Structure formats: C-alpha cells, structure tokens
Image (spheres, helix red, strand yellow):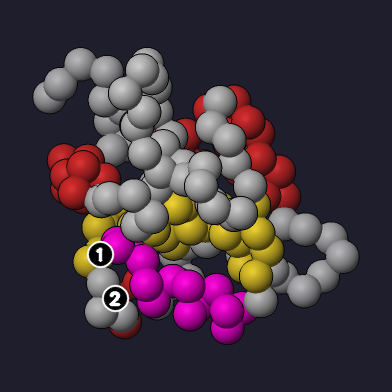
Amino acid sequence: MLKGIPTVISPKLMEVMMRMGHGDELLLADGNYPAESGDWEVVRADGLGIPELLEAILKFFPLDTFVEHNVFLMDNGKKEKPSIWREYERILKESGEDYRIKLVERMEFYDIAKESFCVVATSERALYANIILKKGVIFPDSDR
C-alpha cells in the first residue's frame, strides 16, 4: 500500500493510467457494457460504481485541454438526462479539471470506445453511465 492512493484504484488501474499518454482515452464502463468484447485492455473494478472511481481517478488523471471535448457520454436520446450525469458534472467540477463534455449518439460512442487505451469494467448499475476521459498533459510548472 502507498499513502494517498484511494483504495478504489487498484495497482493495475494505476499502472494503466501511468502507461497512458497524451490523447489516450480511458473508458469507465457500466455493468451492461460489453467490456470483454473488444480488442482493448480491460481492468476489472467489480463491486465499484463509476462515480467513486471517477472521483479517485481525477486526483491523478489530467484531462486534455488541447481538444474541443475531453469527456464523452453516450446520449440517451431523451429530453431528461440520467441523474448520474449530474453526479459526474459535480465530480468533474470539484476536481478543478477543465472539462468539456460531448454527448454522442450510441453507435458513435461505441466507435470512439473502440479506440480506448483501456476499459475499466465496473459494476455500475445506472443506465447510460459509460464515460470516456481523454488524457491530457502535466505541465512543467504545475502542482496538479
């Protein structure tokens, strides 16, 4: 164990985030997502929900500020948005990261997800809870 690393971040997840480079994408997948069906690395986070993982991940994971959108959600096609999205926005805001969310149609989301560096398979039960984060850079004079 190490100091300061939330217990929801497994050694494997920390290793994956360390290996990722600028522009790589991390998919936090809900329990319904076909996480094991693609040609990507999978990190199991069984028993965990996405909000608690997202909050922990953002302590270490810079979002890409050189692109128009650095967070992607699968649009549910309805006027009313899933309540978990409000939780994501709160977590993103509290992280201090410069986040820009894009809602994408289901099949477009799957296309983006195919290019993910890694899929984190969670036990999240909320529908439309999948979220993709695009990794940014750590600037030389940054304390973040």
Q: Name which residue type carries label 1.
A: Val
Proximity of marks 1 and 2: CB atoms separated by less than 8 Å: yes
Give the x, y percent position of residue 87.
65, 40
Q: Name which residue type carries label 2.
A: Glu
Q: Determine the main secondary structure of the stretch shown in magenta.
A: helix
The quarter of the rendered structure image containing the N terminus is: top left
Give the x, y percent position of residue 80.
84, 60
Q: Which residue is mark 1?
A: 42
Left or right of 39? Residue 84 is right
Which residue ends up furthest to the right in the rendered image? 79
Give the x, y percent position of residue 70.
54, 51
What is the quadrant of residue 88 in the picture? top right
- Residue positioned 66% across, 76% down in the render: 105
- Residue positioned 28% across, 30% down in the render: 7
Q: Is residue 59 magenta?
A: no
> In the drawing, what numbered circle is on residue 36?
2
Which element type, helix, strand or loop, lies under badge 1?
strand
Nearer to the camera, 107 or 52: 107
Instruction: Quote the CA–CA distance across marks 1 and 2.
Output: 7 Å
Nearer to the camera, 61 or 84: 61
Which portion, as a residue range, is magenta? Answer: 106-119
Whether residue 53 is visible: no
Q: Is residue 116 magenta?
A: yes
Left or right of 107? Residue 85 is right
- Residue positioned 48% across, 80% down in the render: 111
Whether residue 23 is visible: yes
Vertical placement of 83 versus 129: above or below? above
Of labels 1 and 2, earlier in sequence is 2
